[in-house]
Image (cartoon, rainbow, N blue to C red):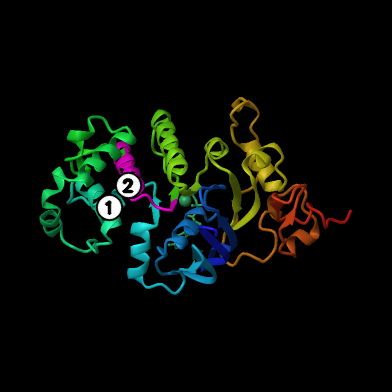
Amino acid sequence: MSVLEIEELRTHFDTDRGVVKAVDGVDLTIEPGEIVGIAGESGSGKSVLAKSIMGLIDPPGEIRQGDIRLHGESLMAKSEKELREIRGKSVSIIFQNPMSTLNPTLTVGEQIAETIRFNSDGGESISLSAEMKRKILGSVKTSESWRRAIEMLESVRIPEPSSRVSNFPHQFSGGMRQRALIAMALSCEPDLIIADEPTTALDVTIEAQILAELQSLREAFDTSILLITHDLAVISEMCDTVNIMYAGEIVEKAPADRLFQSPQHPYTQALLSSMPSIDEPRADLEPISGSVPDLIDIQQACHFAPRCSEAKPECFEIDPEFRTVGDPTHTAACLRRGEEEKQ
Ligand SMILES: Nc1ncnc2c1ncn2[C@@H]1O[C@H](COP(=O)(O)OP(=O)(O)OP(=O)(O)O)[C@@H](O)[C@H]1O
Ligand code: NI
């Protein structure tokens, strides 16, 4: 059974200016142990998609349509409490801004140990005060979960983990906080990790170590990972499957090697030539002309048409369906591509 299935998801924001269609009809499936990437320019809806999965969309945002199933069970009718439990146990999310997720009143070790314990005894400890948590965790420093917390810090390359584990988040540098957060996300051994630009703020050495850690987690526990990043090099190194997202929609989907060898959608082609690749120097980069459209009241047609050099009149009228392009595993939503294309 798939770990995650998203069907026809629409997440919109009702603003003074109109309805922002941030995610507008997305389908996505993640299998056990699969690393699925989402790439696309800024503002294409990647983070809104990630938050939708976790039930973290706040008003004026709303999931207007669609279904999200975890292990076959729909999350759409779950209460806030049930969603929190799912977030603590089977799904972890790693965001770019660690301060918003770390608790400033607990030491890093206490937080990781708590995550580990929450996961292993099913305890509801999330809403207790720091004082209470400390009482409950009392003997934590000699416990198995404390030892695991040190191990986890070590695995994300925090120096001197056995003393750092007693620090508060504000005593960590930005990069160390991000690594601590990743340690926390990994420590509950979730079935699915959603990582939204997890290493963007980190230097390349640390980035490589953390990506390696995510990969070994997948190998050891068959953890599935949804990896969101601007960085196509990271995508090509990490992912089994890649989804290219543009203006609230997925426009192309393929196994990573196929997508990079033979991109089909005009947007993917433009995106690849606008970004530095691993083997080619930065010299001949071509920026994509035009800019990402305003997602307010955007039309049901190809969203890329206004920037596309191959667009024909129908592209401005018809919302393109996904078609296979060259291989059953490779699909693109473009009227000018795929089997049904009429010349
Ligand atoms: N709270 C909100 N209210 C109104 N619009 C929003 C809100 N949050 C996001 N949006 C809009 O949704 C669209 C998608 O934003 P999102 O953050 O998902 O993009 P992204 O692909 O993650 O971009 P980036 O690569 O910069 O992180 C944007 O147009 C954004 O302005
Ligand atoms: Ni984002």
Q: Nearer the viewer, residue 147 or 257?
A: 147
Q: Earlier in the sequence, mark 1 or mark 2?
A: 1
Give the structural element (helix, strand or loop) at label 1: helix
Q: Which residue is mark 2?
A: 187
- Tag 2: residue type? Ser
Residue sitting at the far right: 343
Using the image, determine if residue 316 lies above or below residue 194.
Answer: below
Q: Where is residue 279, by image quadrant?
A: top right
Residue 115: which disc?
Answer: 1
- Tag 1: residue type? Thr
Residue 186 seen in the figure: yes
Does 181 lie within the magenta span? yes
Left or right: residue 219 compared with residue 341: left
Q: Main secondary structure of the magenta part?
A: helix
**Marks 2 and 1: in contact by CB < 8 Å?**
yes
Where residue 133 appears, as percent x and y from the top left, is: 15, 57
Residue at 25%, 47% (x, y): give it.
Answer: 112
- Residues packed near mark 2 inside 10 Å, few (<14), some (14 to 19) or many (20 plus): many
The image quadrant where one finds the N terminus is bottom right
Where residue 249 appears, as percent x and y from the top left, is: 61, 58
CA separation in Å, label 1 and label 2: 7 Å
Magenta stretch in the rendered image: 175-193
Residue 248 seen in the figure: no
Where residue 248 appears, as percent x and y from the top left, is: 58, 59
